[in-house]
């Protein structure tokens, strides 16, 4: 898992650690999650572009949740592309080479431009990233494009101005979308003939 200290990654990590079907979770990041759990193993690297050098430490995993990301606000395309496209591709290539039966799950964003040709910089870069990951020899790839994410259960964004926005918008969203408070999906009864 990548991006475990971010808002999305915190939720994904929590779900993985609680899931009895998951034997172990390897988190690779620039800082520790600060969590202790029997299923959790962490590798902290100053430079995530060195992930391929981890070699056999990357072997034997069924899935990768790639939740790492950065806001494009205030970044030029070169810097945003380096973090969003180049780093993702570097990590994905290393994992695909060692785990061809892996499923790669990439957290992208609503309005991502799969053509890679649009005028919106972040959408174009995300689209190119999705396309590059899809072309790799994984068992399967999934691209999640959330439009809004409501942090829950004590999870917080590490970006201060996101926290301000969530404190204002969150109550409004919850009042209009009560299903966002659900802890699990409601089963739908099967139709009978």
Image: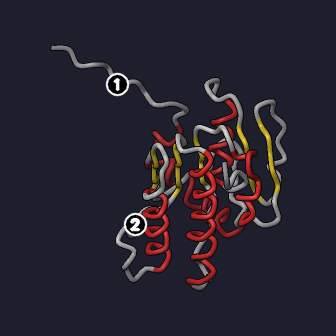
Q: Residues within 10 Å of mark 1 (few under 14, many from 20)?
A: few
2 or 1: tag closer to the N-terminus: 2
Mark 2 residue element: loop
User: Where residue 102 appears, x then y in whole percent?
Assistant: 55, 42
Q: How many marks?
A: 2
User: Where residue 46 appears, x then y in whole percent?
Assistant: 82, 65
Question: Of the residues tagged 2 and 1, which is closer to the observer?
Answer: 2
User: Where residue 34 appears, x then y in whole percent?
Assistant: 84, 47
Furthest toward the top, the residue is 193
Q: Is residue 158 above or below residue 98?
A: below
Residue drawn at (15%, 14%), measured in percent from left and top? Answer: 193
Q: Is residue 108 above or below residue 184?
A: below
Furthest toward the left, the residue is 193
Position of 123 with respect to 160 (left or right) is left
Colour pattern: secondary structure
- Tag shown at residue 188: 1
Mark 1 residue element: loop
Q: Quarter-wise, where is residue 169 in the image?
A: bottom right
Residue drawn at (49%, 66%), measured in percent from left and top? Answer: 129
Q: Is residue 165 above or below residue 4?
A: below
Nearer the observer, 111 or 90 = 90
Nearer the observer, 47 or 75 = 47
Name the residue that disc number 2 marks. 111
Position of 149 with respect to 143 (left or right) is right
Residue drawn at (68%, 28%), measured in percent from left and top? Answer: 23
Residue drawn at (40%, 66%), measured in percent from left and top? Answer: 111
What's the CA distance linking mark 2 and mark 1?
Answer: 29 Å
């Amino acid at each position: 898992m990548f991006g475990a200290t971010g808002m999305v990654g915190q939720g994904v990590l929590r779900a993985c650690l609680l899931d009895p079907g998951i034997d172990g979770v390897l988190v690779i990041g620039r800082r520790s999650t600060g969590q202790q759990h029997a299923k959790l193993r962490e590798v902290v690297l100053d430079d995530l572009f060195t992930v391929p050098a981890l070699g056999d430490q990357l072997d034997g995993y069924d899935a990768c949740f790639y939740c790492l990301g950065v806001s494009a606000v205030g970044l030029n395309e070169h810097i945003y592309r380096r973090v969003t496209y180049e780093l993702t591709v570097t990590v994905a290539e290393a994992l695909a080479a060692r785990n061809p039966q892996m499923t790669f799950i990439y957290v992208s964003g609503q309005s991502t431009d799969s053509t890679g040709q649009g005028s919106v910089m972040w959408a174009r870069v995300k689209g190119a990233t999705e396309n590059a990951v899809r072309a790799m020899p994984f068992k399967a790839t999934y691209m999640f494009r959330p439009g809004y994410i409501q942090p829950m259960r004590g999870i917080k964004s590490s970006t201060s101005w996101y926290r301000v926005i969530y404190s204002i918008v969150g109550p409004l969203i919850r009042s209009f979308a009560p299903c966002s408070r659900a802890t699990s999906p409601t089963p739908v009864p099967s139709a009978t003939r």
